[in-house]
Image (tube, rainbow, N blue to C red):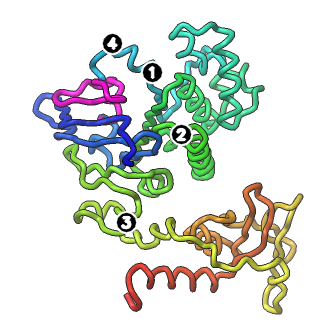
Amino acid sequence: MPIPPAIEFKNVTKTYGENTVVDDLSLSVPAGKITVFVGPSGCGKTTSLRMINRMVEHTRGEILVDGHPNTGRPAHELRRSIGYVLQQAGLMPHRTIVDNIATVPVLKGVSTKEARDQALELLERVGLDRSFAKRYPAQLSGGQAQRVGVARALASGSSILLMDEPFSAVDPVVRSDLQNELLRLQRELGVTIIFVTHDIDEAITLGDQLAVFARGGRIAQFGTPEEILRQPADDFVASFVGRDRGMRRLTFASASDVTIHPLQALQTPWQNWQLKVDDGKPAGWLVDGRLIPGGSLYREGASLRDALDSVLSSPSGWGVAVDNEGKLLGLLKSDDVLDATETERQHRYGVGA
């Protein structure tokens, strides 16, 4: 059976004077999935997100939240019922972390003690120790602040989260960790997430489906990441997803057939590389007495693109495979991974394509 929509846009338009920011938007966001609004700056994706909780009021059309018009109750009540995560976390600097998270429940009439107890549980759920509770926002790193922002959004108790480029201001390593954390939370909680980004790779990583916005506030294409990569609707979408969309499609190909070699496979006459392992986890590559940081790690069961990233980013040319706890499983040989990518290309596009 089709998944019922959590949010529906019905012929929604937003104008400022003579300037049309969102043009006749009709879109259904299914419950329990991650839908990503992606597109270049100024294409109306953030405005569309903010019209859901009436941070921006739409000019024409109708927006339904769980089947009811979002204009059917006061805007402040609507906002308290929907989780909202901003780019800069938006934490109140004069309040402790626990009280930042507890803000919305307290406004909704929950006792301070109960709201704080819930906030402590949410801290752990987003991967932070309870010791962070008494800190202030200025004492957090960017990644930690964004985790608190997610916890505060979850504290609303809503089944819907709106996320407006929440990870764009953190470094790439932290960003990847936050993306994985969000995917874990969504799997555990089954919430509906509408996520805005201008980064097509982030959209592909997170989205069950993508709405690609074009300038003028129109939807150029709506579908799964694989559908959009396989068959862009027009030249704009093809240009936006990039010429290397074939490489991005490897995200949806399994690397399960790629052999994971034992560490002893490194023992060849022409190589001086040694993998340093601490407590069962890879710590970098040793060559001529120098420790060189390793490349991307391939986690067991991940995609062929992850396997390719691992071998291409490794200084030794060998990818490093680990389990879900980061413990070393073995090595990926570059020839094996490249052969697998060629086999996948031929399977998708036909031999010789």
| Residue at the (34%, 55%) spot, across then down | 223
Quote the CA–CA distance across marks 3 and 2: 26 Å
Near-viewer residue (89 or 338): 338
Picture quadrant where residue 72 is located? top left
Q: Amino acid at mark 2?
A: Gly
Sequence order check, earlier mark of 1 and 2 = 1
Query: Which residue carries the number 3 mark?
Result: 229
* Mark 1 or mark 3, earlier in chain: 1
Q: Amino acid at mark 1?
A: Ser
How far from the left and from the top, in percent, is residue 162?
43, 34
Q: Which residue is mark 4?
A: 74
Cα distance in 3D space between marks 1 and 3: 35 Å
- Look at the numbered discs 3 and 2 and tell me whether their residues touch, using CB distance below 8 Å: no
Pick whichever of labels 3 and 2 is earlier in the sequence: 2
Residue position marked by numbered label 1 in the rendering: 81
**Which dot marks residue 311?**
none
Label 4 element class: loop
Return the residue at label 2. 190
